């Protein structure tokens, strides 16, 4: 289930883009009507938040993996 969040995000994006693209290509809808109504500032803030959150998640995961690598595998005593 680990990649389910990413799959959901990509599925939503594909649905949005595939749903609107044919109308623009065939001249039924204007390009300016197909673009998002959000301004440049809103999109920039959204991108910045996205980068900060994903960089934080990646950084914490990376640090955790390094900690596990440094710790090494547990020693097993066989009681001989």
Image: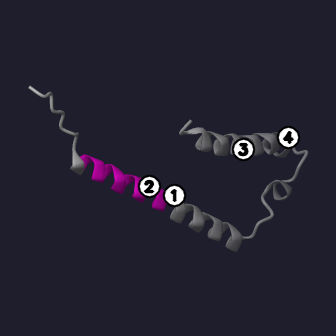
Q: Would you name the residue on which mark 1 appears? A: 54
Of the image marks 1 and 3, the number of the one nearer the N terminus: 3
- Give the image location of residue 53, x and y in percent: 53, 62
Circle 3 packing at 10 Å, graded few (<14), some (14-19), many (20+), is few
Residue occupying image coordinates x 61% and y 44%: 5
Mark closer to the observer (2, 3): 2
Q: Would you name the residue on which mark 4 appears? A: 26
Q: Is residue 54 left or right of residue 47?
A: left
Is residue 68 found inside the magenta-colored segment of the image?
Answer: yes
Mark closer to the observer (3, 4): 3
Of the image marks 2 and 3, the number of the one nearer the N terminus: 3
Q: Would you name the residue on which mark 2 appears? A: 58
> Real-space Cα distance between discs 4 and 1?
37 Å
Q: Main secondary structure of the magenta part?
A: helix
Q: Mark 1 falls on what kind of element? A: helix
> Real-space Cα distance between discs 2 and 3?
23 Å
Residue occupying image coordinates x 72% and y 44%: 12
- Give the image location of residue 64, x and y in percent: 35, 53
> Real-space Cα distance between discs 4 and 2?
41 Å
- Give the image location of residue 62, x and y in percent: 36, 53
Q: How many marks?
A: 4
Q: Mark 3 falls on what kind of element? A: helix
Q: Mark 4 falls on what kind of element? A: loop
Which residues make up the magenta segment?
Answer: 55-69
> Real-space Cα distance between discs 2 and 1?
6 Å
Is residue 66 found inside the magenta-colored segment of the image?
Answer: yes
Circle 2 packing at 10 Å, graded few (<14), some (14-19), many (20+), is few
Mark closer to the observer (4, 2): 2
Of the image marks 4 and 1, the number of the one nearer the N terminus: 4
């Amino acid at each position: 289930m680990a990649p389910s969040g990413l799959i959901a995000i990509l599925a939503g994006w594909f649905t949005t883009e595939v749903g609107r693209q044919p109308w623009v290509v065939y001249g039924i809808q204007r390009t300016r009507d197909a673009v998002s109504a959000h301004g440049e500032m809103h999109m920039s803030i959204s991108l910045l938040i996205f980068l900060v959150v994903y960089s934080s998640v990646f950084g914490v995961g990376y640090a955790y993996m390094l900690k596990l690598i440094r710790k090494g595998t547990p020693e097993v005593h066989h009681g001989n």
